[in-house]
Structure formats: C-alpha cells, structure tokens
Image: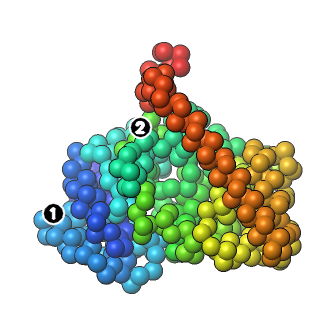
Amino acid sequence: MSENDERKCGNPKVSIIVPVYNTEAYLEQCIQSIRAQDLADFEAIFVDDGSDDRSVAIIEAAVAEDGRFQLLHQDHKSAGAARNKGIDASKGKYLLFLDSDDWIDPDMLSALVANAERYGSDMVVSGAYEFDDDKGTERYATWMYHYDQLPPSPFSWRDIPNRIFTAFPSLVWNKLFRRQFVIDEGIRFQEIPRSNDVYFMGLSSLTAERISAVDNGYIHHRLSNPTSCQATKDFYPHGFLEARIALQAELKRRGLYGDEGEQLQVKTDFLNQALRTTMHMLGSFKNADSFQGTCEVLFPEGGSKSALGFEELGDDAYRNQTQLKMYKALAGAKDDERLFGWSMCVYEIMKARQARSDRMERLEKTGAYRVARKLMRLPRAVKRRLRL
C-alpha cells in the first residue's frame, strides 16, 4: 500500500504499542511524552494487562482527551501477550513498542520515521538513556547500542554476521519496525513473563533485509521500578534461557544458524551473547531456588551439556574467557558443588563490577572524559571530518 493510499484509508504513520501493568506512578509522564511528539500522525494503543491500580483510569482520561489514544484489555498474561494484541489492532505503517514506565523525546517519531523512509528500512535502531529512579540521575546507555560497530545504513545481518546479536541487545523499545515486515515474517512476541522480546528482536535482526541506524538516543528507560521485569529477576528466572532456546530453534529452522560460513558466524555471536547473559543472570539472582531452577533448564539432562550448546564451539571462540571459566565451573556440578560454583560466580561478577565502577568514577572526574563523551555523541559525518 502506498503512502497516499494509507492516508486515504486513514491509517496513521506509526502505531505506538504500550503494555501496561500497574504503572500508575509513571504512566502520566509516558502519555504526555507521546502526546508531545512533533510527528502527530500516530495512534497510541495501550494494552492493559490486568492492572489493579489506577492505570486504567489514567489511560481512559487520555483516551477521552485525544482521539489518537485507545485502550485494550486482557487478563494478566504478560507484556508479550499485550504487545501481540497491540500488533493485531495496529494500523500504522510502522510499529514502536514503548514500556509504560518510560518516556520519549518529542522528536523520536519524526527522527526514526525519517530514517526509515530514507533507507526503506524494515527496522531502525537508536540509542537510549537510562534513568535511575532511586538516584534521580540519567546517563547515555552505551552498553545497549554500539553505533560505531555498525556498517553504513542500510545493512542486514549478512554485513555483520559476527556481531548481529552483540551490536544491539535484544530490546525492542529503542527501535522502529515496519509493520508489514513484521506481519509477513510472522514475527511475534513470546507470551512468557520475562524476556519476551528476545525472540522477537532476534528474529527481526536476522530476517530484516534493510536495517538502518540513528546516531542518537530518544528514549528514557527507567531503572529501579520495583514492578518492572528487570527488577524482578527471581520471578520466572529461567525466562532468558527459554527465550533463547526458542530463538535458536527458529533460526535453525530458517537456515540462519549452522556450522559453516555466515551461519557459523551467527552461531558464534549468538552463543557469545547468550553466555554473557547467562553468567550475568546467574550472578544476579537473590535466592538459591532461582539459581538451581535455572541450572536445571540450562543443563536439562543433568550433565555438563547445556541446552544452548555452548560446548559446540571451541574455547577460543568465546570472547570473554573469564565468563567461560565461570561457566565451566558450573557445568557438570551437582547440588552443593553447584552452589559453591555459584558463589564463586557472584564473587567474580561483583569484583569485576566494582573495578569497572571505580574506573568510571575516576574517569568522570576528569575534564578529558567529559569532552570525550561529547565527541562520541557527534554524528558520524562530523566524526569523520574530525578524524575521530
């Protein structure tokens, strides 16, 4: 359907899909940031996932004030189920998935849509900011978006098969997707309590023919929300594994994951990213039951072979040898031995985090660091002229 046909049918340029579950404290800020967009041609689909606070009333007030807003309901299932419901109801040319405790800059839609139109993109990737709700501080999240590692836009996984999973993590809320691409490829969110976007994001990255990138951040992602998935890792702790097992199986089915050529590079990057996430999660749980339950999923036969096949690559294929060593300490261990291995994992992770935090604190006190951060945010064309 052409752009003119879309306008004649009354279809909006962007469908913003927002799953909502008990976020009354943050929802108004999210709604106002959507309403403030300088690209007014959008629909905002809020999908209530069985909230029992004032979230529904807040959305109903927004719907009454603005015809671009709508509210859908479902029993408490998951954010993934809510996002799928939003996709089914959407009419926009593009899809934007936003968490209800986050907010976006006024030019996010216009910037991402302009980029998508320029390159004919199936997916547009952008940066993001992290807002620490406890400290009231914000920083640019360099870990989630490695713009300088990406080839010039547009590109596809074939241009970066060895880092398609690590160049930008499995998060959907800092990206724009062409709706017809999502529908044609049959890409859906897993309807699981945690990590529901891993499958959607991974499959999108490996099936998009044209990906483009914006060298800027527009979304403010809230940390320290006690009800968010990130803050409740011990609830459904093995979700991150379940998601990657399903994604791995689908990539194999589609012939995108294997032991030769580009497929081997995809496999290597996938397993490197999966190992990093696995060791991070195992070191983040707050109780032993979460750890043991996750290990049972990771080692389904009770032996040393993992469900994801970490053993299928040689040791030298892993970029972080410390993480590999920590993983091997767990593989094949039983009960108390495994718990001892876990305690060592936590110790090593906390030691590394503290060392990194100390380095950052020392760097941030220097004027050179602040200048460097500003230079890194310059557009790529400017960096090239300055030879950065």
The numbered mark at residue 158 is: none
Residue, disc 1: 66
The quadrant of the image that shows the N terminus is bottom left
- CA–CA distance in space, label 2 to label 1: 29 Å
The numbered mark at residue 216 is: 2
Is residue 239 visible from the viewing direction of this image?
A: no
Number of numbered discs? 2
Percent across and percent down for residue 103 are 32, 54
Badge 1 density bin: few <14, some 14–19, many ≥20, Cα 10 Å: few
Helix, strand or loop under label 2: strand
Amino acid at the residue labelled 2:
Asn
The answer to whether residue 292 is left or right of residue 14 is right
Residue extending furthest bottom?
Answer: 75
Percent across and percent down for residue 265 are 75, 47
Q: For the point 84% across and 44% down, which residue is it?
A: 316
Q: For the point 53% across and 20% down, which residue is it?
A: 388
